[in-house]
Image (cartoon, rainbow, N blue to C red):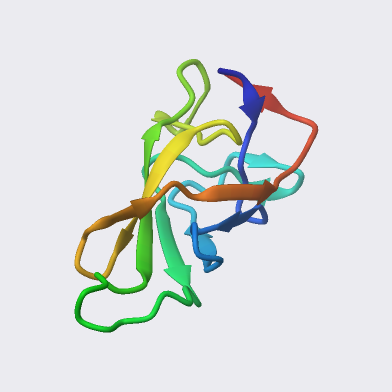
Amino acid sequence: MPGFILHVGATVMCPHGGQVQISPGNPRVKVGGQPVATVADMYMVSGCPTPVPPPVPGPCLRVQWLVPAVRVRAGGQPVILQSSTGLTFTVQQVPAGPPNVVMTQVRVKGT
């Protein structure tokens, strides 16, 4: 499914409202002057407000993208699109739901 390509400056949030920081592995390919996000990059969540009592698995820690772009690659790795499917994982590695892409650049699309 086509969508705008994510970059380091994109706003991505966990299902509970925590901010996702993208650490690019390949800073050479850029859109809007910022490195594109690929499936090989690190996506760490900070500020997840999920409480940590014993029955709850804990706050979100990271994002793993399951369905990246099919046709567009950067440095040999598929890029992440606004329409890509992913999951957030808690500190105990329990799936916590899909991440929400709130804002990204709106000039370059991929499929």
Q: Quadrant of residue 91?
A: bottom left
In percent of the image, x 49 and y 50: which residue is there? 99
Q: Nearer the viewer, residue 55 or 63?
A: 55
How many numbered circles are shown? Answer: 0
- Give the residue at x 52% y 22%: 72
Residue 97 versus residue 31 in the image, above or below: below
Q: Is residue 12 left or right of residue 59?
A: right
Compared with 17, 51 (above or below) is below
Residue name at image x 61 percent, y 42 percent: 6
Residue 82 drawn at (x, y percent): 61, 36
**54 or 77: which is nearer to us?**
54
In which quadrant of the rendered image does the C terminus lie?
top right
Q: Position of residue 13 (x, y in %)?
A: 56, 58
- The foreground one among 98 and 4 is 98
Residue 51 x, y percent position in the rendering: 38, 80
For the point 55% across and 17% down, which residue is it? 1
| Residue 3 picture location, percent across and down | 64, 26
Q: Is residue 92 left or right of residue 107?
A: left
